[in-house]
Image (cartoon, grey):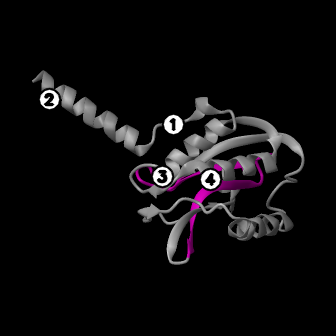
């Protein structure tokens, strides 16, 4: 996903819309890049960002610290309109040093992916400056029972910084 996207319509709620995503999951599984999604097992949950401020953020899952895959917010164009869309990608274990540990969850991969889709269906429209991939990650963490691992978004950090500056100026 490009971090230059500014706006996207909500996810379409049709089986046909998710067909491409289902095919993507099957392809990753066939390539040995996904665990058996039917098995209940312990998943370690991380997040990863493209950059510190304004960069795309994804949730990363693994069962063995060897194979890592994302559940993330992406985009798909339908009838000339951009809509949010679920994306799952395999990522190299060499990126683990850039990941932030968020917690562990014992469940099936299908449950984790189902939660990712359910959150996306409730997400609404995407805006680069708010209701973006960082908000999606926080909503996902709450949906899988790891609300305590939510982090401040860039907008939250910016509001905090502006508040501190205004408080400092008011004291002068």
Q: Earlier in the sequence, mark 3 or mark 2?
A: 3
Residue tagged 3: 132
Q: Which residue is mark 1?
A: 151
Assess whether mark 4 and mark 3 are in contact (beta carbons under 8 angstroms): no
Tell me which numbered mark, 2 or 1, is placed earlier along the sequence.
Answer: 1
Q: Earlier in the sequence, mark 4 or mark 2?
A: 4
Tell me the crowding category of disc 2: few under 14, some 14 to 19, or many 20 or more residues within 10 angstroms, Cα based.
Answer: few
Q: Nearer the viewer, residue 92 or 172?
A: 172
**Image x and y of residue 115, in percent:** 70, 46
Which residue is labeled 2 in the image? 169
Q: Residue at x 26, y 30 (%)?
A: 164
CA gap between label 1 and label 4 equals 21 Å
Estimate the spatial distance between the alpha carbons at disc 3 and disc 1, rounded to whole Å: 13 Å
Which residue has dot 4 on it?
A: 121
Of the image marks 1 and 4, the number of the one nearer the N terminus: 4
Q: Quadrant of the C terminus?
A: top left
**Is any atom of residue 129 visible in this view?**
yes
Q: Which residues are magenta?
A: 49-78
Q: Dot 3, how many residues are within 10 Å of its Cα: few (below 14), some (14-19), or many (20+)?
A: many
Secondary structure state at the residue bearing disc 1 = loop
Density class for disc 4 (Cα within 10 Å; few <14, some 14-19, many ≥20) is some
* Proximity of marks 3 and 2: CB atoms separated by less than 8 Å: no
Disc 2 to disc 1: CB gap under 8 Å: no
Disc 3 and disc 4: Cα gap in Å? 14 Å
The circle drawn on residue 53 is none
Report the Cα–Cα distance between label 4 and label 2: 43 Å
Name the residue: 80% across, 58% down: 34
Closest to the camera, between mark 3 and mark 2, is 3
Indicate left or right for 72 with 62 as reference: left
Is 26 inside the magenta-drawn segment?
A: no
Side of 134 where 104 appears, left or right: right
Residue 64 appears in the figure = no
């Amino acid at each position: 996903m490009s971090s230059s996207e500014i706006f996207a319509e909500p996810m379409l709620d049709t089986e046909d819309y998710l067909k491409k995503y289902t095919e993507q999951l099957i392809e990753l599984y066939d390539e040995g890049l996904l665990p058996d999604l039917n098995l209940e097992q312990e998943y370690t949950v991380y997040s990863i960002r493209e950059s510190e401020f304004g960069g795309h953020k994804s949730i990363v899952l693994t069962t063995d610290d060897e194979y890592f895959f994302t559940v993330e917010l992406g985009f798909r164009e339908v009838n000339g309109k951009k809509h949010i869309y679920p994306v799952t990608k395999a990522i190299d274990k060499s990126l683990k040093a850039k990941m932030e540990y968020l917690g562990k969850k014992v469940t099936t991969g299908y449950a984790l992916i189902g939660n990712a889709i359910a959150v996306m269906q409730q997400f609404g429209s995407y805006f680069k400056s708010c209701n973006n991939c960082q908000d999606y990650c926080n909503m996902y963490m709450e949906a899988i029972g790891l609300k305590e691992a939510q982090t401040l978004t860039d907008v939250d950090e910016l509001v905090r910084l502006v508040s501190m500056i205004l408080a400092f100026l008011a004291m002068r």
